[in-house]
Amino acid sequence: MTLDILIVDDSAAIRKILQRVLAQTELPIGSITEASDGVEALKALQAATPSLVLCDINMPNMDGLQLLTAVRARPEWAAVRFIMITTEGSPERVMEAVRLGASGYVRKPFTAEEIKEKISSCAAAIA
Amino acid sequence: MTTFSVERLSLLIAQHTANVCRTMLNVDVTVAGARPHTAGPKGSVVSLIGLTGRWNGSGVVSCDGDVARRLSGRMLMTDFADVNADVLDAIGELTNMIVGNVKEDIARDLGALAISTPTVIYGEGLQTRAVDGDIDARVCFACDGGVLEVHLSLLPSTRGPAMATPAIVTGSTQPITSGV
């Protein structure tokens, strides 16, 4: 089973770095698509449902927690996993993300190994 | 009155800037004292983020264009001949990480704070002016052959947590080439 991944971050630099990290993994990565905010991400989800979303929180238009809430409200997207990748590291924000259904949380700045480890855990749960 | 000190804010800026630069850029930075950056032949890059909550203010990261080019190149593993949209985006993200992490720590003392998305400006003769904060720290770093400057300024909110206290930038901006 391949992992189709959607990267959601308003920073093109972070999207590029995550693409590079994904290219380094030995996981069966399928498609990788990008969105620069929650609104774009919802459009991408409607076009093709990914298995995993790597998602920033602090973004314009629709932030990561609003996106997660919108996705969890749609039963057809119940299986989509979310890993939040953000500077927002307070226990309250982490708890909120978990309560909304995030599978993982990575604090910026991050290493490639931290990202790979979280994706591997998600991939194991999906398989 | 808060007991939160300028020294503590300076220390947090130093710690988080060093951590962000080491983790994302693989470069060590050292505190360089009061050495604000001077614009090089490629102008200056100034990146601003607003802070709101019980305290309002701004975080500003600035450096000359050559330093911005080199730091962004390290982040994206690409050589940038000029300051372009990718360079500005990378500096904005570094600002987000530095100010965002400092914010998480100071929120323990000052209450929850929210940050805006960064605004990044590139130009010549840029000067920034933030409202004199009750808590105001400026730390300069020797970094990749130049100077990186981080400035945070905070004032207690008197009208509720609605408005950031803006930093003002003056100078002439330069057009940039489009990014990838």
Image (cartoon, rainbow, N blue to C red):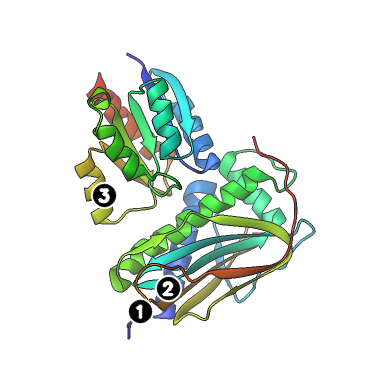
Q: Chain of mark 3?
A: A
Task: State the SS at label 3.
Answer: helix
- The residue where tag 3 is placed is A94
- The residue where tag 1 is placed is B4
Mark 3–mark 2 distance (CA, rounded to whole Å)? 24 Å
- The three-letter code of the residue at mark 1 reads Phe
Establish whether labels 3 and 2 are both on one chain: no
Mark 1–mark 3 distance (CA, rounded to whole Å)? 25 Å
Q: Residue A117, relative to residue B5: is it above or below? A: above
Quick check: can you spot residue A40?
yes
Q: Chain of mark 2?
A: B
Residue A62 is marked as none
The quarter in which the N terminus of chain A is drawn is: top left
Residue drawn at (47%, 49%), measured in percent from left and top? B23
Quick check: can you spot residue B21?
no
Q: Are marks 2 and 1 in contact (CB under 8 Å)?
A: yes
Left or right of B109 in this view: B68: right
Q: 10 Å neighbourhood of mark 2: few (<14), some, or many (≥20)?
A: many
A73 or B14: nearer the viewer: A73
Q: Residue A65, relative to residue B116: is it above or below? A: above
- The residue where tag 2 is placed is B9
Q: 10 Å neighbourhood of mark 1: few (<14), some, or many (≥20)?
A: few
Left or right of A127 in this view: B93: right
The quarter in which the C terminus of chain A is drawn is: top left
Residue B136 placed where, x, y %? 48, 78
B127 or B8: nearer the viewer: B127
Residue B28 placed where, x, y %? 54, 56
Q: Residue A14, relative to residue B106: is it above or below? A: above
Left or right of A48 in this view: B177: right
